[in-house]
Image (tube, rainbow, N blue to C red):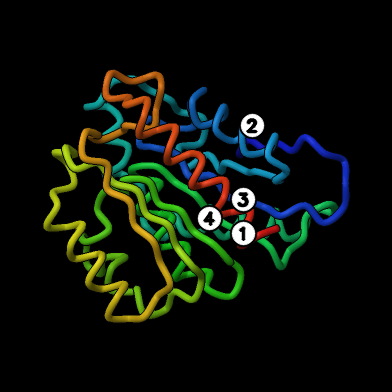
Amino acid sequence: MGFLAWSEDTAALPGLIVLQEFWGLNEHIKDVTERLASEGFAALAPDMYDGRVTTDPTEARQWLMALDPAEGLQKMNGAVEHLKSTANVDKEKIGVIGFCMGGRLTYLAAAHHANDVKAAVPYYGGGITMGNPSPLSRTGEIKCPMYLFFGAKDQLIPMDQVGQINTELTTKKVPFQMKIYPEAGHGFFCDERGSYHEASAKDAWEKTKSFFAQHLK
């Protein structure tokens, strides 16, 4: 299951995988997918929860904890393969973007699909440094350029974790950029949440579009 969008019936569109927050494949993620489609991408948001969506953080956390890592990877594999097999998608130009839980999965996808993913943008990737093994431990497998976005007031992702990510990417010589917004907290990009920070979200969106245009178009 997933949500697929493109706005141009032309051949060889660059493809993007859009990875959800822990709430599920909700209207916000669908909106982001459509916004990316309007920028000239074939954008696919795989449904990691098989149709379940919630606004209850306790329920969302339970679903996140219950998500089997192997099953999550299988769904990402399916999304990548689906885009590669779609007639109007250039299979050599596929990127990935994700938010919160999806930010962690984006980091993992950049490593796991190193031969397919050509650009990756994790937004406040929760848990990149956590787990056994953690996505951070696979940094050396990443080949593509990355742009990472964080909020300095994010209570779920302390700045020491952001520092660990920065150090590991630098040490492993992964080409990357990182932007930390001083006034932004967790979920600052989502305009349906109280944590939305308009100035940071708009700036990050422009940087995201430019980054994907540079590396996928």
Q: Is residue 111 above or below residue 130?
A: below
Disc ID at residue 16: 3
- Within 10 angstroms of label 3, few (less than 14), some, or many (20 or more) residues? many
The reply to whether the C-beta atoms of the residues labelled 2 and 1 are less than 8 Å apart is: no
- Disc with the residue nearer the chain's start (4 vs 2): 2
> Gap between marks 3 and 2, in whole Å?
11 Å
Q: Is residue 101 left or right of residue 18?
A: left
N-term mark: 3 or 1: 3
Q: Amino acid at mark 3?
A: Leu
Q: Quadrant of residue 30?
A: top right
Give the left or right position of residue 74, taking residue 24 as reference. right
Looking at the picture, which amino acid does disc 1 mark?
A: Gln
Neighbor class of circle 4 (other Cα within 10 Å; few <14, some 14-19, many 20+) is many
Q: Residue at x 61, y 69 (%)?
A: 116
Q: Could you tell me residue 26's position as x and y percent? A: 48, 26
**Residue under circle 1?**
214
Q: Which residue in the structure is indicated by mark 4?
A: 76
Between marks 2 and 1 in the image, the one whose residue lies nearer the viewer: 1
Q: Name the amino acid, label 2.
A: Glu
Kind of residue at disc 4: Met
- What secondary structure is found at the residue carrying circle 3? strand
Mark 1 touches mark 4? (CB < 8 Å): no
The quadrant of the picture occupied by the N terminus is top right
Which residue is pictured at 30% across the width and 44% down the height?
A: 66
